[in-house]
Image: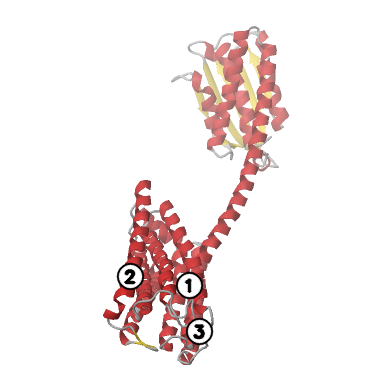
């Protein structure tokens, strides 16, 4: 059912809508053409040398590759309709060979390459039309009923092999029966005209083709089958004009051959168009991939530069290797956490509430942290800067401040205040009930980063106070239209 819905959706796509419009115009044009030719169809026409070879060669050269392409599509998208349609075009392509061998004058003037029944050529041609029409009609019915069955890859290949084998056997059987037993069957031609049975069988095939066209236009409307409808229209018109001619080498017969040559090219042109479109998409995708790689390269370089600065500064403020490794690991983990939040949002921004909770999560218990404030969305640049500052505040609080002892508390709250040009974010970090603050805690890489990063990168203000009863920090940064337009690659 899901695949059936997908087909109905695809019918509303731009390519399918365009193909529907083109197919309607194509059908109307061919209908007008047929009405114009039918009055002249019975007139004798010239015996054009090589018309049979041209007809057979064109049909073989277009319909055989079309069948291969349909089987390839079936392997990628195992639908019964595609398997049946590929079999129809394979059948049509293979039937060209016995037709060419048994048709008088196709290769040798007024002679046929393979002897035998005088009715052989007519039986082969009628079997050709009926077989193609029937297989096509079955394909259209499968597509209309949305009969889908997914195969394992091995069974898909087996299905294709079975279809090719079955079609080959049928073509060979029809050919042998027509050549060996054609004179023992009801006559399809009494030179130079065709019999009523011949007309009935061709009319039946034409009715099947016309039914397929109608079903496609009213029920399917997928791009592939709309192009198929155009191809079938040319075949149906060819049979109508040829039937109106009544015999070989009339104007109707010759025009029908030329019309069928056009029909053989239609679906082949569809696949060529699909190939050209895919090549164009590959070029666009390649350019997009190059842009993505360049962007990724830019990001990686920036991150590595940040890590290098952090590592150098951490080394200078560390008193031992263990302290250096512990501090560096914590800062890199903080950067990675901020990067992860940005990545989840598609680098569109991160909520301040999520950022604060993420930084304080390693130290949080049920009572030691209070967080409050509206969930303000920060840009990527604001997220990275605030993550670094919050990490240093939390780390200092865990080492020396309120989070270093039981009963200590940290309060983080923020608000958005409007100003003349936009708004300011005001965030307050307050530590309570912690140990007395030591004066030497005021000078370190972390405290310098807290004081200087926000003004330098975001144009904000930071007021960091080491009061005896606890550290407090007020951060103000401009947000709104200007901050949201900041380049996240910086």
Image coordinates of residue 12 in percent, x first then y, are 46, 63
Mark 1 or mark 2: which comes first in sequence? 1
- For the residues labelled 1 and 2, say whether their Cβ atoms are less than 8 Å apart: no
Residue ID at (69%, 17%)? 313
In the depicted view, which residue is nearer to us: 166 or 9?
166
Residue ID at (52%, 79%)? 51
The residues bearing labels 1 and 2 have C-alpha atoms spaced at a distance of 19 Å
Q: Quadrant of residue 98?
A: bottom left
Q: Which residue is mark 1?
A: 56
Above or below 97: residue 488: above
Mark 3 or mark 1: which comes first in sequence? 3
For mark 3, give the secondary structure.
helix
Q: Is residue 50 left or right of residue 384?
A: left
Mark 3 or mark 2: which comes first in sequence? 3
Q: Which residue is mark 3?
A: 33
* Camera sees residue 413: no
Q: Nearer the viewer, mark 3 or mark 1?
A: 1
Q: Which residue is mark 2?
A: 176
Q: Residues within 10 Å of mark 1 (few under 14, many from 20)?
A: many
Which image quarter is the N terminus in?
bottom left
Image coordinates of residue 24 in percent, x first then y, are 48, 75
In the depicted view, which residue is nearer to us: 16 or 433?
16
Above or below 168: residue 286: above
Image coordinates of residue 169 in percent, x first then y, are 33, 63
Q: How is the image coloured?
A: secondary structure
* Camera sees residue 455: yes
Q: Residues within 10 Å of mark 3 (few under 14, many from 20)?
A: few
For mark 2, give the secondary structure.
helix
Q: Quadrant of residue 212?
A: bottom left
The residues bearing labels 3 and 2 have C-alpha atoms spaced at a distance of 37 Å
For mark 1, give the secondary structure.
helix
Residue ID at (50%, 70%)? 57
């Amino acid at each position: 059912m899901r695949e059936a819905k997908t087909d109905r959706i695809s019918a509303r796509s731009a390519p399918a809508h365009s193909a529907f419009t083109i197919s309607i115009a194509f059908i109307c044009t061919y209908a007008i053409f047929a009405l114009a030719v039918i009055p002249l169809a019975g007139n004798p026409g010239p015996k054009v040398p090589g018309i049979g070879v041209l007809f057979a060669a064109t049909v073989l050269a277009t319909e055989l590759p079309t069948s291969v392409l349909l089987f390839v599509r079936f392997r990628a998208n195992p639908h019964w309709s595609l398997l049946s349609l590929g079999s129809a075009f394979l059948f049509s392509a293979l039937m060209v060979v016995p037709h060419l061998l048994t048709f008088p004058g196709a290769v040798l003037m007024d002679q046929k390459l393979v002897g035998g029944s005088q009715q052989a050529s007519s039986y082969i041609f009628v079997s050709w039309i009926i077989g193609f029409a029937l297989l096509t009609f079955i394909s259209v019915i499968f597509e209309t009923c949305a009969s889908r069955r997914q195969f394992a890859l091995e069974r898909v290949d087996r299905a294709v092999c079975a279809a090719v084998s079955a079609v080959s056997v049928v073509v060979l059987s029809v050919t042998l029966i027509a050549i060996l037993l054609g004179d023992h069957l009801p006559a399809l031609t009494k030179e130079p005209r065709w019999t009523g049975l011949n007309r009935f069988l061709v009319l039946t095939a034409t009715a099947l083709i016309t039914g397929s066209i109608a079903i496609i236009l009213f029920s399917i409307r997928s791009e592939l089958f709309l192009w198929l409808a155009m191809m079938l229209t040319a075949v149906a018109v060819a049979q109508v004009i040829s039937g109106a001619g009544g015999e070989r080498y009339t104007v109707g017969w010759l025009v029908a051959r030329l019309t069928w040559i056009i029909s053989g090219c239609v679906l082949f042109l569809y696949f060529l168009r699909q190939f050209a479109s895919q090549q164009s998409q590959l070029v666009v995708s390649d350019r997009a991939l190059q842009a993505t790689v360049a962007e990724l390269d830019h990001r990686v370089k920036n991150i590595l530069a940040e890590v290098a600065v952090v590592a150098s500064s951490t080394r200078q403020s560390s008193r031992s290797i263990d302290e250096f490794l512990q501090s560096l690991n914590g800062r890199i983990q903080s950067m990675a956490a901020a990067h992860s939040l940005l990545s989840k949002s598609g680098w569109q921004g991160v909520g301040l509430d999520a950022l604060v909770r993420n930084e304080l999560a390693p130290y949080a218990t049920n009572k030691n942290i209070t967080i409050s404030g509206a969930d303000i969305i920060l840009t990527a640049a604001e997220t990275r800067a605030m993550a670094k500052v919050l990490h240093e505040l939390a780390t200092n609080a865990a080492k020396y401040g309120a989070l270093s002892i039981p009963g200590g508390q940290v309060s983080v709250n923020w608000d958005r205040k409007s100003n003349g040009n936009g708004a300011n974010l005001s965030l307050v970090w307050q530590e309570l009930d912690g140990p007395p603050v030591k004066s030497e805690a005021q000078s370190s890489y972390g405290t310098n980063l807290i004081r200087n990063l926000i003004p330098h990168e975001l144009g904000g203000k930071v007021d960091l106070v080491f009061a005896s009863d606890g550290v407090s920090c007020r951060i103000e940064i401009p947000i709104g239209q200007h901050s949201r337009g900041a380049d996240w690659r910086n």
